[in-house]
Image: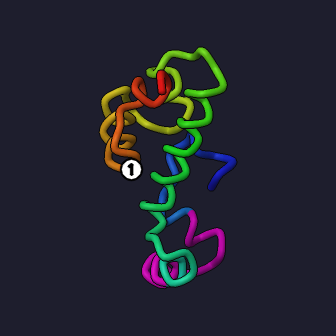
C-alpha cells in the first residue's frame, strides 16, 4: 500500500492479491493492525503529506494529488481530522 499511495487502492484488489474475500481480508487486517484498511490508508497518506509539507516546497494541492487525495480540500479535511491542524499550519509550524 505504501508504495502506491498516489493511486486508487481498492479493498477488492488488496483481498485478491492475497486470495481472500474482502470481508475476511478486512477483518484480518483490522485484527492485525488495529485499523481498517481504509483507516490505515488515510493515516499513511497523511503521514506522507506531513513529510512532503516539511521536506519540499510543493504546493499543498500537488501534495494532495501525490498522496492520493482527490483535492486540496479532501487532504485538508483528513489532515485536520488526524492531526488537529491544517496542512498550511503544519508546514509553517
Residue 56, image x and y in percent? 64, 20
Q: Which residues are magenta?
A: 14-27
Residue 40, image x and y in percent? 50, 61
Q: In front here: 87 or 67? A: 87
Secondary structure that dominates the magenta span: helix
Is 92 located above or below residue 12 in the figure?
above
Q: Please identify the residue farthest to the right as the structure is shown.
A: 3
Residue at left 61%, top 35%? 51
* Residue 36 on the magenta span: no
Residue 88 sits in which quadrant?
top left
* Residue 15 on the magenta span: yes
Residue at left 38%, top 50%? 82
Residue 63, image x and y in percent? 52, 26
Q: Which residue is mark 1?
A: 82
Q: Please identify the residue farthest to the front as the structure is shown.
A: 93
Is 12 located above or below residue 21 in the figure?
above
Number of numbered markers:
1
Q: Quadrant of the N terminus?
A: bottom right
Residue at left 59%, top 41%? 48
Amino acid at each position: 500500500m505504501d508504495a502506491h499511495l498516489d493511486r486508487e487502492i481498492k479493498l477488492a484488489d488488496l483481498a485478491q492479491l492475497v486470495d481472500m474475500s474482502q470481508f475476511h481480508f478486512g477483518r484480518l487486517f483490522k485484527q492485525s493492525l488495529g485499523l481498517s484498511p481504509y483507516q490505515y490508508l488515510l493515516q499513511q497518506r497523511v503521514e506522507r503529506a506531513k513529510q512532503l509539507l516539511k521536506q519540499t516546497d510543493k504546493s499543498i494541492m500537488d501534495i494532495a494529488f501525490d498522496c492520493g487525495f482527490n483535492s486540496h480540500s479532501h487532504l485538508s479535511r483528513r489532515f485536520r481530522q488526524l492531526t488537529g491542524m491544517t496542512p498550511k499550519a503544519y508546514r509553517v509550524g
